[in-house]
Image: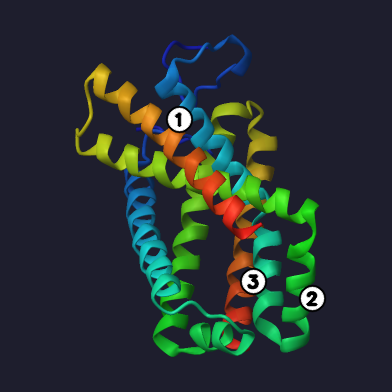
Amino acid sequence: MKRVITGAHYGFKDWLAQRVTALLMAIYVVVFIGILLVCPPREFEQWRGLFGNQPMRIATILFFISLFWHAWIGMRDILMDYIESTGLRLGLEIAVVLILSAYVVWAVQILWSI
Amino acid sequence: MIAGQRPKHLNLFKIRLPLPGLVSFLHRISGAGLFLFGWALLYLLQLSLSSAESHAQFTALTGHWLVKLFLIALLWSFLHHFFAGLRFLLLDVHVGYNLAAARATSWAVMIVSLACTAFLGLWLW
């Protein structure tokens, strides 16, 4: 197989990662909605306490990492389909990776400064 | 260009979509929208969690009708992406594979995500 920059044909790992991250996020979302329904946080302190709880904080950061990984695969697919110029596509893909990496750091900062 | 060469590039203006195709295309649009405005959602999460003062700021900001409309658009994006995504996961394991079922589940995705958006939008307004 001849590999080309930002090409396709060897995407099984990404295909699978997209589905696994999707399932993990779906489980988190359903559990999170369940928590909101069972004990709705009515005030700031309760809302903050919910995310300050260590298991919840770790589950949330895993949710975010899944989200950003999932977003990377999706955005890469979109760019591969519609952007014909290899140089522009590579530039945009780098931008997406940088933005998503910054989001990871930001999400950690939000959750661990509680 | 050699036939079958990858990556393929699609011309959006030459494509006419049947309903399952529309669901798939909206899955794309909604995903891209969520990516493009992810910073806004993270910012709102940060405001809501940092301190009592920032939480008050969060309440004020999300109280504005323009912000509400924007969040409802993102809510629809999320719900459509969620339900269409579940449909794709089922298709991956060959559930709902024939044409009639694929059309029925496409209608279900469209209707359920719009209905949930309307319900949650009105409830949270």
On screen, B123 above or below A51?
Answer: above
Q: CA distance from mark 1 to mark 3?
A: 29 Å
List the residue tagged with mark 1: B24
The quadrant the C terminus of chain B occupies is: bottom right
Q: Nearer the viewer, residue B73 or A4?
A: B73
Report which residue position mark 2 lands on.
Answer: B57
Residue at mark 2 shares a chain with residue at mark 3: yes
Badge 3: how crowded within 10 Å, few (<14), some, or many (20+)? some
Residue A72 percent location from the top left of the image: 53, 51
Neighbours of disc 1 within 10 Å: few (<14), some (14-19), many (20+): many
Residue drawn 40% across the image and 32% down it: A2
Foreground residue, B106 or B24?
B106
Q: Residue furthest front?
A: B123
Q: Secondary structure at mark 3?
A: helix
Is disc 1 placed on a helix, strand or loop?
Answer: helix
Residue visible at 64% across and 49% down in the picture: B72
Q: Residue at x 72, y 48 (%)?
A: B69
Q: Report the residue that reaches farthest toward the left.
A: B94
Q: Chain of mark 2?
A: B
Left or right: residue A112 compared with residue A9: right
Tag 2, which secondary structure? helix
Viewer-proximal residue among A40 and A83: A40
Q: Position of residue B57 (x, y in %)?
A: 79, 75
Mark 3 residue type = Leu
Q: Which residue is mark 3?
A: B45
Q: Of discs 2 and 3, which sits in the foreground?
A: 2
Query: What chain does mark 1 sit on?
Result: B
Disc nearer the start of the sequence (1/2): 1
Q: Earlier in the sequence, mark 2 or mark 3?
A: 3
